Image (cartoon, rainbow, N blue to C red):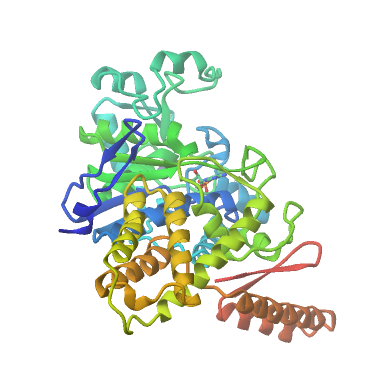
Amino acid sequence: MTLDQKYPLHFTNSLSGKKEKFEPIHPGFVGMYVCGPTVYNFVHLGNTRTFLTFDTVSRYFRFLGYKVRYVRNITDVGHLVNDADEGEDKIAKKARMEQLEPMEVVKQYTEDFHSVMRVFNILPPSIEPSATGHIIEQINITNKLIELGLAYEVNGSVYFDVKKYNQQNNNSYGILSGRNIDELMESGRELDSQSEKRDKRDFALWKKALPAHIMRWPSPWGDGFPGWHIECTVMSTKYLGETFDIHGGGLDLKFPHHECEIAQATGANGKSPVNYWIHSNMLTVNGQKMSKSLGNSFLPSELFTGNHPLLEKGYTPMTVRFFMLQSHYSSTLDFSNEALNAAEKGYKKLSAALTIIKQADPTGTGAPDAELSSGLHHLAEQCYQNMSDDFNTAKTLAVLFEMASRINDIKSGNLVVSRIDKETFDFFKKTYVGFMEDVLGLREETSHNHELLDGTIQVLIELRKKAKTDKNFALSDKIRDDLKAIGVQLKDNKDGSIDYTVE
Ligand code: AMP
Ligand code: ZN
């Protein structure tokens, strides 16, 4: 019996709003697409929560024995300010402000994104396609939608015709977000007099590039750039098929981004693109969504150094990972120093038990106790049961705490290993180590090492400052570059202070 048969996986499908049993399209395989970052700025801790959620999801599938193809894109064109259909491209705007080429902006923030993912032990996806690498496919599908009568061109831009789609598809626009079409008509913004759209629900598949627009590609409709929603339709179906297992993303993307993805793909391919949708909830600060535009976001590097007005002190990456795993992905998670302090203690306890169990010697004298063994077996099994019940990391951690207490009993001599039958001991150990490291991604991280590393880097930062003051730029650059080569990235702040991130 496979692990998946033993502990059948159920999770909430946002499309039905219900918990459903997972039935993969191809037995033993999972295809999952997750909307990646728009790389125009440093990723903040809120973004990190979403990617951590799907990291845990893909880790658990692998742990159960599935072969996972996880596609997470990089949005490097088409995402306009305010997530709208009019206005400047987020990346082009940043490039203009910093007098850089758009692809320099993309490179810089993609690297930052990758280093943040590494620090949090968020594993890379199987494929990481970028929107600019799929312009031809986006033009092709736009053409197809025009041919099918589901899109129309106006003055070099192409829009998806929501009304037409609804006529052909049983009024299904709104199927994911639960918004009904009349409500959308009532609540949507009025079309301004210059709008080219026939209907205010319509959305852009392709936009004409004005002369000043730097990110542009030739198309059958003249120079332009793709809309934001079409990139995900193209990249998900290209690598996972016209219908695939799972599509994930932050809850804030459910409407309009994911709703539009369903409409485009269904319109173009005549079938629903995704069997299961998973939406992870927001990281909040004092109840408000953490976001760059609200000014309540902070960077992972600020979190590690404690260099931010909202922070009492610095926290290690694994403490933060633990903090995020303590809540269910579908609930909001509010940031607070108290919660992080508690997470720091909790993580240390679990981590210490990890070290003990790895070293525990199962040999010894004495007969195994059947009742004791069976109790421990049932306890360990609850890790599988909780994760298979909507990826409940919070309940899984609670079980790991109970297991850690038993492990501490082994250390103190209150529990003699030889009283546990060999099979149970092996299962208990494999479960504890496997759920800590492989499923929850909580690797060992001793505070001693962290303090030592932090202290050493601070010394080098001071030396670099001194070299700069002495106008010894060769030395200051060498310190920066050598640190970078071993995965420590220095960041000069405007006020003269220096932060760092560790890969
Ligand atoms: P963006 O780079 O703005 O396209 O966002 C990247 C991802 O981060 C998306 O999946 C968003 O849903 C997610 N995200 C943005 N803000 C938060 C937040 N405060 N909490 C959780 N996820 C977020
Ligand atoms: Zn997307």
Q: Quadrant of residue 431?
A: bottom left
Is 429 on the left or on the right of 268, as rendered? right
Residue nearer the viewer, 40 or 390: 390
Residue at 37% of width from left, 82% of height from top?
361
Q: Quadrant of residue 161?
A: top left
Quarter of the image that includes the N terminus: bottom left
Say above or below: 357 vs 394: below
Is 61 on the left or on the right of 412, as rendered? left
Residue 92 at x, y percent in the picture: 57, 48
Residue at 56% of width from left, 61% of height from top?
346
Q: How many marks?
A: 0
Quarter of the image that includes the C terminus: bottom right
Residue nearer the viewer, 193 or 401: 401
Say above or below: 54 vs 264: below
Residue 142 at x, y percent in the picture: 32, 37
Residue at 46% of width from left, 73% of height from top?
414
Say above or below: 412 vs 6: below
Residue nearer the viewer, 48 or 371: 371
Can residue 36 be seen at all in this image of the molecule? Answer: no
Residue 313 at x, y percent in the picture: 72, 61
Q: Quadrant of residue 278?
A: top left
Residue nearer the viewer, 293 or 402: 402
Can residue 320 be seen at all in this image of the molecule? Answer: yes
Q: Farthest residue in the right direction? A: 470
